[in-house]
Image (spheres, grey):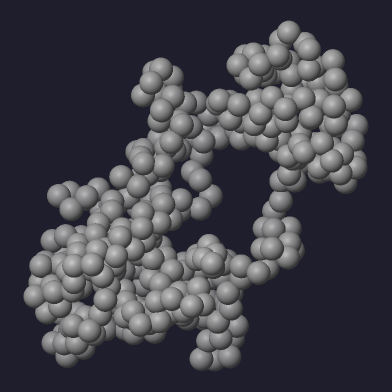
Amino acid sequence: MNDNAIFKDLLVIELASVLAGPAVGMFFAELGAKVIKVENKLTGGDVTRNWKIPQENPKDEFSAYYHSINWGKEKVLLDLTEEADRNQVLDWIKKADIVISNFKFDSAQKLKMDYDSLKAHNPKLIYAAITAYGDDNPAPGFDVMLQAETGWIFMTGEKEGPPVKLPVALIDILAAHQLKQGILIALLKRQMSGEGSYVSISLFDASVAALANQASNWLNVNVLPQRMGSQHPNIAPYGDIFYTKDHIPIILSTGTQKQYEGLCASLGLEMLITDERFLTNTLRLTNRAALNEYLAQAIGNQIYATLQETCTQKKVTIAPVNNMEAVFNMPNAQKLVLTETLPDGRITKRVRTAVFKVK
C-alpha cells in the first residue's frame, strides 16, 4: 500500500486549534485519512487564521501559520452550543475513528465533547486529548510558558546573553509527536480488542520527556545546564561555529575520537592530535576555549567549498549554517513541500509532517 494512503479508511474529527492538535490532524490527512476540522464559528475559526506576519495580505482568509498544519482537511465553521451544529458534529463522531481535542477538561464536559460523553455514541472511538498540564489540572498553557517552566529557555542562548525562546513552538510539536504515537498504539489495540481508547498528552510531560541528556546531567551528577550557545555540554568540538575565509558560518559535529583526528588532519592541525590538552573528549571539553582558538584560525584560512570537500574525504562532518532560503534551495527539502490550492485559486505551501518511509 502507498504510504500516503495507508489511513484512507479512517475518519478523523479535529476539535483542536493552534498547533499541537492540528499537527496531529494533518499527519493523518497526509496518510490518506479524511479529516474534518471543526472550528468555532463564534470566534471566527482557529485563532491562527489571523496570526499573520506584516508581509502577509491582511485580507487573506488564512495566515501562513495556519497553512503550516492544516493541509488536506475539510474545514467547517460551527457552533457547538447550537443544537443543529452540535448534532452535525455528533453524526460525524458516531462514524469516526479518532477525535482530536485540546479543550480544557471542564470545557469538554460542559459541551459534552469529553471522552465519556462521546464513547456512549461510539464505543470504538479513539479520543486523543492535549492539555497543558494534565487531565487533573485545568490551567491553560502556551508553548512559550512551557519552554520557560521546563528549562528550555533557561539553557538557550549565548553564555553571556539573556535566556532565549526557541524559534519554533517546539513543545507543541513534541506533544503532537507523542499524541500520534499514542493514537497509533490505540489503533493497534482496537484492531486486537475492538475497543476504543482515551489517549492524552500534556505539554508539560512532552516537554520534560524531551530534555534527554540535559535532564540526565542534572539527575545523575547535579550539573545545571547553562546557556552555551550552540555548543554541546558533553562533546567537543561539537556545535561550535566558525567562519571560513569566504565568510560562510559552519558548525562542527565531531562526535568521535576518529572524527576529531580527521578534523585536525583536514585543517593541517595534526599536532593537536597528540597535544596533551586535547587527547580525550573530556580534556577537550575542559580546554575548549584553547582548542577553539586553533580551530578558528585554521578554518578562517579555508574556502568553504575546499574545506567541505576535504572533510568529506576524511569522513568529517561539518555543515553550513543555512537560512530558510538556503534550506529550501536544497532538492531534498523541496521534496518535502506540500502544496494546496485554495477555492480562490491561490496556491499555498507548507512542509510535510509525515516524512518517514515504510517498505
**Percent of width and height locating residue 184:** 34, 63
**Percent of width and height locating residue 167:** 53, 50
The answer to whether residue 176 is left or right of residue 30 is: left
Which of the 4 image quarters holds residue 273?
top right
The answer to whether residue 66 is left or right of residue 196 is: right
Q: Is residue 240 visible?
A: no
Q: Residue at x 85, y 22 (%)?
A: 269
The answer to whether residue 339 is left or right of residue 134 is: right
**Percent of width and height locating residue 171:** 41, 50
Q: Is residue 294 above or below residue 32?
A: above
Which of the 4 image quarters holds residue 285?
top right
Q: Residue at x 35, y 40 (%)?
A: 208
Q: Of residues 106 and 255, which is closer to you in this image?
A: 255
Q: Is residue 91 above or below residue 105?
A: below
Q: Of residues 227 and 308, which is closer to you in this image?
A: 308
**Percent of width and height locating residue 175:** 37, 54
